[in-house]
Amino acid sequence: MKKRKTILSFLILTVFVLSLVTFSCTTNPTEGKNKIVIYSGVGISLNNDSIFINKTSAEELLQILQQKDTFSITKKHSELFDPKNGEESSIDEIIKHISHKGIDFEYKGKIKEKLSLENITIKANPDFLVFIHDSISLGQINPPIEKFYELKSESYDLISDNNLVYHFYSKGISFRLDSFSKSRKLSEVTVHFKHVGAW
């Protein structure tokens, strides 16, 4: 009789443990989400693929994203200013944006066939887990940005007066936050070149 009770108790315990494991797997909030890791001034890791600033071509990117090239190009004229010597200059560029589920890849160059990846902008998206730093992730409320990213150069690093826009050009990363109530939500991150010279 005792043996039967022991076996019955064991079976009940086994079923209970299996139920917990199944429930845990089916309610995992990260399951099925794409993982993105940010590398300031370098690029991003999208799942198992690496995408590099100034290195990954538009053709290579489209292969990674498994998308057809249906994206148009535009021409832009920009006025540039060098804060060190006060000189102004201008440049004509060809720009191409490739979009993928809230991620914008911006290519620029003077020749259509030789565009380089200059900016990767990612907006908060429930389908993505975006890791920027051990203590900072996209969509986070009141992220400790200033604790881990300090102003290095007044010429190239800028913070808006309302603390909602951070441009760390010397580090190759920028942040945009949304304000609500007394909190701030990290809504967008951009990876770009590290600016160490003139604009």
Image: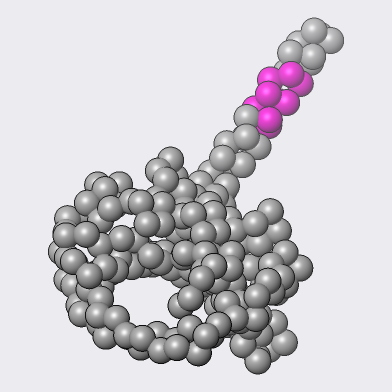
Between 136 and 57, the one nearer to me in the picture: 57
Visible residue check, residue 61 = yes
The image quarter in which residue 183 lies: bottom right
Query: Image height check: is 178 above or below 31?
Result: below
Query: Image height check: is 17 above or below 54?
Result: above
Residue appearing at x 69%, y 74% in the figure: 151
Where in the figure is residue 24, as x and y percent of width and height? 61, 42
Q: Residue furthest right?
A: 2
Instruction: Tell me the quadrant of the picture where the N terminus can be found.
Output: top right
Q: How is the image coloured?
A: one colour
**Predominant SS along the magenta part:** helix
Which stretch did the figure color magenta? 9-17
For residue 131: magenta?
A: no
Visible residue check, residue 139 = no
Residue appearing at x 40%, y 43% in the figure: 49
Where in the figure is residue 131, as x and y percent of width and height? 58, 55
Residue appearing at x 47%, y 64% in the figure: 193
